[in-house]
């Protein structure tokens, strides 16, 4: 089985938008996950002139990387990868919440040790990445989503979070679930998360649970993410 790890172009952008005289124009974010594999990412969404965060067009730029292992016959392969993407984003929002829809080029480089000639994702590859993320945001609950798809590699990711709000809506506790894969690989995960708002601009989120690949036993995972609007 040739595993592919999707490097998220953006996390759930769930930081609260501050109520200031000037509307925010963007968000920066970073995070990572540790399990039987490890990955990290960082990036930013910046609204184009005449737009603001949640309204109109924006540009998103992100980068990620990590390491994972898989078996090719009797040989364990170690894969180190790095990726970068750039996308045009359409932002919409209202009293119901917000949603982003984006598309753009994605570049990934994967180094295998030892070399596995049967892995089509070795070396450098270009793809077209499609993504949507957002949330249905109520007074007490928030349902957030993120979905990403690579057109050429047929690599996919879908993630949901349902959180209960506390302390004047600044903090959330809830459950999360995700599925990711490609035509030869599938991984599902489920767990819990805690999101803490620090001031009006910054949110820190920690999560953990169990992830399971098809044909393998479950593994524990832990995650950390930060998002700050500006």
Image (cartoon, rainbow, N blue to C red):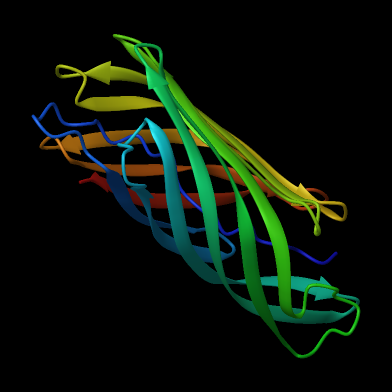
Say whether residue 60 is visible. Answer: yes
Question: Could you tell whether 102 is left or right of 206 in the image?
Answer: right
Q: Is residue 136 above or below residue 7?
A: above
Q: Considering depth in this image, is 150 or 117 the residue closer to the camera?
A: 150
Say whether residue 162 is visible. Answer: no
Residue 198: quadrant of the picture: top left
Q: Residue at x 36, y 31 (%)?
A: 54
Q: Residue at x 45, y 60 (%)?
A: 61
- Please state the horizontal and vertical placement of residue 182, each as a whole percent of the image: 80, 52
Q: Considering depth in this image, is 36 or 161 the residue closer to the camera?
A: 161
Residue at the front extreme of this rendering = 50
- Please state the horizontal and vertical placement of residue 11, each as a whole percent of the image: 45, 46
- Please state the horizontal and vertical placement of residue 7, each as a whole percent of the image: 57, 59
Q: Is residue 86 above or below residue 143?
A: below
Q: Residue at x 29, y 26 (%)?
A: 172
Q: Considering depth in this image, is 177 or 131 the residue closer to the camera?
A: 131
Q: Residue at x 68, y 72 (%)?
A: 69
């Amino acid at each position: 089985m040739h595993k592919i790890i999707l490097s998220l172009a953006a996390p759930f952008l769930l930081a609260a938008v501050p109520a200031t005289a000037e509307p925010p124009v963007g968000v920066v974010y970073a995070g990572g996950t540790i399990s039987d594999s490890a990955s990290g990412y960082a990036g930013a969404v910046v609204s184009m002139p005449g737009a603001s965060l949640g309204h109109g067009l924006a540009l998103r730029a992100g980068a990620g990387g990590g390491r994972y292992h898989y078996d090719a016959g009797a040989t364990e392969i170690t894969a180190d990868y790095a990726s970068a993407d750039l996308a045009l984003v359409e932002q919409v929002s209202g009293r119901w919440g917000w949603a982003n829809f984006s598309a753009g080029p994605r570049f990934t480089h994967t180094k295998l040790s030892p070399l596995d000639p049967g892995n089509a994702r070795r070396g450098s590859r270009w793809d077209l990445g499609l993504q949507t993320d957002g949330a249905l945001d109520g007074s007490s609950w928030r349902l957030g989503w993120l979905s990403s798809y690579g057109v050429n590699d047929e690599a996919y990711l879908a993630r949901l979070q349902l959180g209960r709000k506390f302390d004047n809506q600044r903090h959330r506790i809830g459950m999360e679930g995700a599925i990711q894969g490609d035509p030869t690989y599938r991984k599902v995960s489920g767990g819990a998360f805690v999101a803490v708002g620090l001031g009006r601009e910054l949110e820190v989120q920690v999560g953990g649970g169990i992830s399971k690949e098809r044909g393998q036993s479950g593994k524990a995972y832990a995650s950390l993410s930060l998002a700050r609007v500006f």
